[in-house]
Image: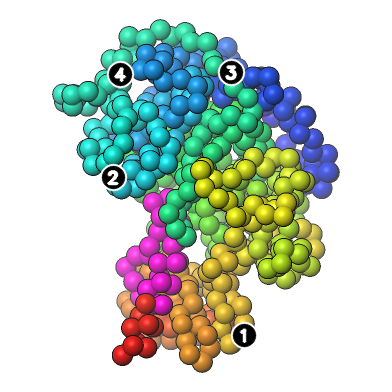
């Protein structure tokens, strides 16, 4: 699946029209109908190339690299460990680890054994872990000393624990990950599965409620490789770094599975995000292709152009996913990093679906999420599921029958009302232009109704972020007797700005001049931080619910 030389820029419309599922499936070693294994597709097929599969950088200064051949042997050892513990095809293995080689070995060995990998983000507390393990029924959790104590607080579940040793004695009953791995054979025949069988079990990010289990079948490999090829434009000579954590969909899909599918190395850094380390790693490894979230990119902007100067011009491609990319970020990256940064849209349930594609020639509209990835058809629907004309807000939907790359078929063990009448409803309000490009308005429950106007929070947030005093912001509708709702903005200021009534009024007028007389924040509250999911997505519903609760209290008084 490595891109062939000279095949890097193609016309979007021609590529979209020529998409053929059988042609995509022919790129796999295995067969979705007769037998396939994710470890073979990502590791074994490249084991004889001598190429590096993982560059690892530790926050304590250590570094290492692993070839595809080395990971093939390590994955076999872990698969043998699983079999020795009575774990096999279809069973769930969870990983509660930072971005270390042991994490990648756990993922690959799980796939090799035909089992299903479940990510557990290391920032989760015991209750968040318990909810996900209860959903999956995982038989083994692989963790380290820093996260081990959380598992003692998980109640009512039975599972085995393998711990990466830290030099201290392990609790009774724990499996010594390293010692057991060393005892196992480095050969293991991959267990073949069908395309409809699972290889990942994800959880939604919880932006609107309790996380739901998302089964990911092996057929999703086709979608993941297409995104890396067409949208990320991953080339053989790139140094690729996706800074997203594999505890979440964008990291697991596209920092692990996607690049390895194309026979390309990935890069892990096991520390938390800092501006200094991000620039240091880009410079040290010569990163040319970067992927991450707007939250991280806004922090780079907040640090200023002086910090960015050392890597200016080194990034060939930058991709953004997780939440809409504000236009100010696009302009800043062009000016201070000399790098094109493109917005990409998707969900845990679908992978990336609508993108400004780095590899495909098409018009890129600032503020737009882009065009459907070849293999998907999207539409904007009204409340009666009728497809809407251009420039009319509605819910973005995926046309199931005409989207051969769509792999999601429902949540684990619970109803999926988002699948209805031949569509998957994303729950995101968008507008579609004449050329098919899609612009984000907001989550369906985030859209603000004020004096008869429907106002998308994203536009207001993007205007606010352009002000030099603003680092981050979240906009919600606050209940109002006269207008139904008013626009309220929660604002995080830069270190150089001080909250004041004068600044609040300045921000109000700043947005009003850029948008309209109705779509500006009538109320501004300065805050130290905004509520987010552990993956960094804004949780506007928390702020909105706070305002609803306050309004109810005032009504009672």
Residue holding disc 4: 178
Of labels 2 and 4, earlier in sequence is 2
**Dot 3 crowding, Cα within 10 Å, few <14, some 14–19, many 20+:** many
Of labels 1 and 4, earlier in sequence is 4
Residue holding disc 3: 192
Residues at marks 1 and 3, CA–CA distance in whole angstroms: 57 Å
**Dot 4 crowding, Cα within 10 Å, few <14, some 14–19, many 20+:** some
Residues at marks 3 and 2, CA–CA distance in whole angstroms: 34 Å
Q: Secondary structure at mark 1?
A: loop
Say whether residue 528 is left or right of residue 235. Answer: left
Residue 215 placement: quadrant: top right
Q: Which mark is residue 141?
A: none
Q: Position of residue 62 (x, y in %)?
A: 32, 29
Residue 528 in sight here? yes
Q: Which residues are magenta?
A: 526-548
Using the image as rendered, state which of residue 159 and residue 538 is in the foreground: 159
Q: Secondary structure at mark 2?
A: helix
- Single out the mark in the foreground, 2 or 4: 2
Of labels 1 and 2, earlier in sequence is 2
- Say above or below: 144 vs 73: below
Residues at marks 1 and 2, CA–CA distance in whole angstroms: 44 Å
Q: Secondary structure at mark 3?
A: loop
Residues at marks 3 and 4, CA–CA distance in whole angstroms: 26 Å
* Residue plotted at (37% across, 88% down): 555
- Say above or below: 174 vs 120: above
Residue holding disc 2: 126
Residue holding disc 1: 452
Residue 173 placement: quadrant: top left
Using the image as rendered, state which of residue 212 and residue 239 is in the foreground: 212
Of labels 3 and 4, earlier in sequence is 4
Q: Position of residue 120 (x, y in %)?
A: 38, 39
- Single out the mark in the foreground, 1 or 4: 1
């Amino acid at each position: 699946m490595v891109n062939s030389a000279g095949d890097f820029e193609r016309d979007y419309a021609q590529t979209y029209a020529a998409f053929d599922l059988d042609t995509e499936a022919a790129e796999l070693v295995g067969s979705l109908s007769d037998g396939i294994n994710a470890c073979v597709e990502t590791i074994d097929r490249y084991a004889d190339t001598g190429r590096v599969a993982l560059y690892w950088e530790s926050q304590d200064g250590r570094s290492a690299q692993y070839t595809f051949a080395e990971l093939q042997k390590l994955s076999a050892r872990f698969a043998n460990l699983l079999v020795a513990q009575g774990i096999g095809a279809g069973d769930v293995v969870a990983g509660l680890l930072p971005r270390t080689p042991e994490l990648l070995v756990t993922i690959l060995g799980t796939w090799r054994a035909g089992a299903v990998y479940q990510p557990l983000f290391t920032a989760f507390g015991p209750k968040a872990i318990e909810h996900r393990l209860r959903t999956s029924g995982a038989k083994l959790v692989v963790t380290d000393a820093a996260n081990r104590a959380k598992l003692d607080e998980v109640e009512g579940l039975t599972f085995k624990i393998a711990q990466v040793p830290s030099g201290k004695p392990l609790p009774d009953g724990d499996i010594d990950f390293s010692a057991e791995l060393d005892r196992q054979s480095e050969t293991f025949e991959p267990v073949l599965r069908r395309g409809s069988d699972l290889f990942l079990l994800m959880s939604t990010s919880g932006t609107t409620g309790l996380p739901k289990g998302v089964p990911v079948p092996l057929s999703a490999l086709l979608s993941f490789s297409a995104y890396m090829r067409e949208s990320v434009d991953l080339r053989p000579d790139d140094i690729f770094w996706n800074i997203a954590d594999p505890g979440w969909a964008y990291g697991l899909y596209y920092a692990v599975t996607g690049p390895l599918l194309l026979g390309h190395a990935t890069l892990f850094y096991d520390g938390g995000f800092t501006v200094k380390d991000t620039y240091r790693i880009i410079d040290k490894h010569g990163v040319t292709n970067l992927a991450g979230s707007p939250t991280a990119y806004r922090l780079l902007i907040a640090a200023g152009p002086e910090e960015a100067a050392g890597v200016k011009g080194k990034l060939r491609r930058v991709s953004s996913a997780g939440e809409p990319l504000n236009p100010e970020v696009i302009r800043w990256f062009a000016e201070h990093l000399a790098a094109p940064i493109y917005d990409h849209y998707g969900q845990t349930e679908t992978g990336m679906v609508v993108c400004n594609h780095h590899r495909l020639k098409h018009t890129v509209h600032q503020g737009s999420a882009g065009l459907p990835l070849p293999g998907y058809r999207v539409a904007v629907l009204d409340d009666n599921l009728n497809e809407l004309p251009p420039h009319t807000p509605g819910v973005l939907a995926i046309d199931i029958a005409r989207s051969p790359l769509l792999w999601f078929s429902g949540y684990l063990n619970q109803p999926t009302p988002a699948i209805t009448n031949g569509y998957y409803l994303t729950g995101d309000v968008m507008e579609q232009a004449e050329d098919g490009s899609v612009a984000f308005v907001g989550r369906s429950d985030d859209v603000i109704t004020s004096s008869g106007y429907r106002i998308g929070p994203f536009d207001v947030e993007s205007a606010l972020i352009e002000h030099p005093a603003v680092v981050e912001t979240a906009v919600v509708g606050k209940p109002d007797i006269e207008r139904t709702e008013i626009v309220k903005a929660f604002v995080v200021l830069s270190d150089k700005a001080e909250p004041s009534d004068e600044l609040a009024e300045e921000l109000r007028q700043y947005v009003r001049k850029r948008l309209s007389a109705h779509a500006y924040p009538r109320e501004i509250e300065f805050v130290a931080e905004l509520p987010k999911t552990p993956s960094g997505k804004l949780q506007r519903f928390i702020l909105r619910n706070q305002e609803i609760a306050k309004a109810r209290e005032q009504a009672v008084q």
